Image (cartoon, rainbow, N blue to C red):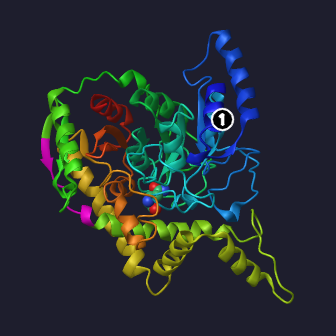
Amino acid sequence: TEACLSQIEGAGALNAFVHKTPEIALEMARAADTRIKSGDAPAMCGIPLGVKDLFATKGVATQAASKILEGFKPEYESTVTQNLWDAGAVMLGKLNMDEFAMGSSNESACYGNAVNPWKVDERQLTPGGSSGGSASAVAADLCLAATGTDTGGSIRQPAAFTGIVGIKPTYGRVSRWGVVAFASSLDQAGPMTKSVRDAAIMLGTMCSHDPKDSTSTDLPVPDFEAMLTGDIRGKKIGIPKEYRMDGMDAGIEKLWADGTAMLKDAGAEIVDISLPHTKYALPAYYVVAPAEASSNLARYDGVRYGHRAKLAAGEGIDDMYAKTRAEGFGPEVQRRVMIGTYVLSAGFYDAYYNRARKVRALIKRDFEEVFAQGIDAILTPATPSAAFGLGEMANADPVAMYLNDVFTVTVNLAGLPGISVPCGLDAAGLPLGLQLIGRPWEEGDLLNHAHVLE
Ligand code: GLN
């Protein structure tokens, strides 16, 4: 913990930690020492972690990287972080992210963006998003692991951009209680770690059945670490043809072929598969996610939390709502609230929201069909490119940024587990990740496949 705290002090330029809690960390570390000496400490005991700013941490600033939550200190702890603290893990502080987890570059944060510790020329690179601070902190050794959340790729894409491991579990595997809501039918928390083994250990600690989240499962939590045998002989790996996009980056294509060969060498059978509705995933996601966000974000009204606009003489409560939200939400969040409100409005509900829900069902069915054919895991690239330069996409059309999520959003729409594993470098020397998609509730098997790719 002391080593991490001093590493954090020297890494201010990365802008990864946005609220530091050194006193809490040292107190937790001392308690962990005592527990370890007593001889019955779980694997996470004493492990210093960073926490994405989206998780409610009791008495510690929780802002979702938004000005609208300025000064908010929750009265309660999220279930996921409580599970980690109960196992003896140590909190170093809160990590940068895109505002309300909306973005793919960490550039919508009210704190300014986090920076990728990887650098090959004069350009500063994005660590990805929305869990960009988490990825940057783990990659730069500011913490041993971090929590992330993933609504459309926010664990897997930043993991790929920074050369670390990130897993989004099956929807319902981890409690969403105390995690600031973005799109509730898609959001899941997960670990961001340096290795698949760390991910297995940390995921096992994060999972629990939680009556406070009605979508959390009461299935038993297997010993994920014990499932990392490296034996995938006879397993069937699907390679979906729809993920082979026109004009695909040559480095990504090679990475994908190399990963396929590694799984084959380990004794798996490689099968060409089709997921025919893939091309509709991005448009469906960018209807469903903003729709849910517009509803979830209605609670930020200047009355209950954080920021409240100052009113001029004669202004009333409606002015207070409007001014507070105009001042408190950044441009990307405002864009999503407007899109979401529009697609849910009486005149357009059927044309957009209902249609997107039907497309979502078809995407889910595509996966069910390939799993019914005996496919154990699906291998795809995690991202269309390596980390891009800060400012490069943010200053372009917002849709260019949305295209980054092309390989990841299908997994959230279908509620499946997905993992990004660092598998090599591109021609410029930047890390690239491969994604494995697993059967629902079979994170252990998925982690074992990922372990082979490490
Ligand atoms: N980049 C996607 C978005 O902006 C995904 C974000 C996420 O997974 N939280 O919505």
**Residue at image coords 51%, 50%:** 115
Which quarter of the rendered picture does the N terminus lie within?
top right
Of residue 72 and residue 368, the one placed in the foreground of this image is 72
431 in the magenta segment: no
Tell me the residue that label 1 is attached to: 91
**Span of residues in magenta:** 271-279
278 in the magenta segment: yes
In this rendering, would 408 be left or right of 329?
A: left
**Residue 341 percent location from the top left of the image:** 53, 78
**Residue 417 percent location from the top left of the image:** 37, 44
**Residue at image coords 25%, 23%:** 231
Which quarter of the rendered picture does the C terminus lie within?
top left
Q: Name above or below for residue 20 compared with residue 312.
A: above
Tell me which corner region of the image, top left, top right, bottom left or bottom right, holds residue 206. top right
Tell me which corner region of the image, top left, top right, bottom left or bottom right, holds residue 200. top left
**Residue at image coords 59%, 40%:** 11
Q: Is residue 16 visible?
A: no
Of residue 2 and residue 221, the one placed in the foreground of this image is 2
Of residue 51 and residue 186, the one placed in the foreground of this image is 51
In this rendering, would 242 be left or right of 354?
A: left
In this rendering, would 421 be left or right of 23?
A: left
Specify few, some or many for label 1: CA neighbours under 10 Å numbering under 14, 14-19, or 20 or more.
many
Q: Name above or below for residue 129 compared with residue 228.
A: below
* Furthest-right residue in this view: 313
Question: Which secondary structure, mark 1?
Answer: strand
Amino acid type, mark 1: Met
Q: Is residue 314 visible?
A: yes
Cβ of mark 1 under 8 A from ligand 1: no
Q: Name above or below for residue 320 compared with residue 58.
A: below
**Residue 333 percent location from the top left of the image:** 55, 69
